[in-house]
Image: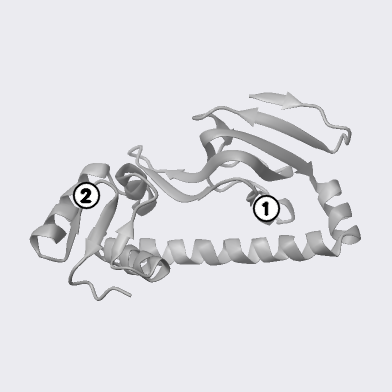
């Protein structure tokens, strides 16, 4: 990790390597961070060491804005680097100045925070489903609608998909095999074909 000075003392540019932690759970949020390059993910690690990936963010996404003005400013989960990243950190006072003086920034920030709330709501709804199969079916139907096809192309590995569901990779693999045996899907490394799941 290497911080690079900028002209404005209220912001800084930092480079992170893959695997580094940007913030630990319960660390106090002191800046709004804009990802300029790379990817970071919000993760929850349970007592058994299982990783649940809540969301992965790439270039031009932000983190921390929803905490910066909260009465509870601690990160509820860990923020980790998925791919070498460059992050711009803006302190609270600078963000306030931008909100007051730039209507476009204010509207974009409010929209981003609102969208983030919807993402978390969808994630909670998915997690609340009781079985791995129910989570998979919900995910596949959603992706089928988005991709407008009964052939769902995976943009993440099955390991990352398992982390999204908060389960072990082996558990996800077993359920995929069962669903294939039941005639619901067929799949290879990069695609899952919906057969009897009432796709989009």
Q: Position of residue 95 (x, y in %)?
A: 81, 51
**Left of 71 or right of it: where is 126?**
left
User: Which residue is found at the position 54% from the left and 67% from the top?
Assistant: 118
Give the number of the mark in front: 2 or 1.
2
Q: Position of residue 102 (x, y in %)?
A: 87, 60
Compared with residue 3, is residue 72 higher up or lower down, i.e. above or below? below
Would you say the residues marked 2 and 1 are in contact, meaning their CB atoms lie under 8 Å apart?
no
| Residue 135 in sight from this viewpoint | no
| Residue 198 in sight from this viewpoint | yes
- The tally of labels here is 2
Front-lying residue, 24 or 79:
79
| Quadrant that contains the C terminus | bottom left
Disc number at residue 188?
Answer: 2
Which residue is most to the left? 181
Q: Position of residue 5 (x, y in %)?
A: 81, 27
Compared with residue 116, is residue 25 higher up or lower down, i.e. above or below? above
Task: Return the disc, 2 or 1, that comes first in the chain's sequence.
Answer: 1
User: Which residue is found at the position 74% from the left and 33% from the top?
Assistant: 13
Q: Position of residue 78 (x, y in %)?
A: 53, 41
User: Which residue is found at the position 28% from the left and 54% from the top?
Assistant: 191
**Callout 2: 10 Å neighbours few (<14), some, many (20+)?**
few
Front-lying residue, 111 or 96:
111
Q: What residue would you read off at disc 1? A: 67
As helix, strand or loop, the secondary structure at mark 1 comes to helix
**Left of 109 or right of it: where is 102?**
right
**Callout 1: 10 Å neighbours few (<14), some, many (20+)?**
some
As helix, strand or loop, the secondary structure at mark 2 comes to loop
- The quadrant in which residue 140 appears is bottom left
């Amino acid at each position: 990790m290497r911080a690079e000075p900028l002209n404005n003392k209220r912001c800084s540019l930092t480079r992170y390597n893959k695997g580094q932690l940007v913030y630990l759970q319960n660390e106090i949020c002191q800046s709004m961070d804009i990802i300029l390059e790379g990817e970071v993910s919000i993760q929850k690690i349970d007592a058994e060491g299982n990783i649940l990936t809540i969301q992965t963010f790439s270039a031009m996404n932000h983190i921390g804005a929803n905490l910066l003005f909260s009465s509870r400013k601690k990160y509820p989960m860990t923020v980790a680097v998925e791919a070498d990243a460059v992050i711009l950190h803006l302190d609270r006072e600078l963000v306030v100045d931008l909100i007051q003086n730039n209507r476009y920034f204010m509207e974009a920030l409010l929209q981003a925070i609102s969208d983030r709330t919807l993402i978390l709501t969808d994630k909670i709804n998915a997690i609340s489903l009781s079985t791995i199969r129910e989570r998979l079916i919900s995910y596949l139907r959603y992706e089928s609608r988005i991709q407008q096809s009964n052939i769902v192309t995976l943009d993440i590995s099955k390991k990352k998909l398992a982390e999204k569901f908060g389960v072990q990779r082996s558990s996800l693999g077993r359920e995929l095999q069962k669903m294939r045996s039941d005639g619901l899907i067929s799949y290879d490394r990069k695609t899952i074909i919906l057969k009897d799941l009432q796709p989009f």
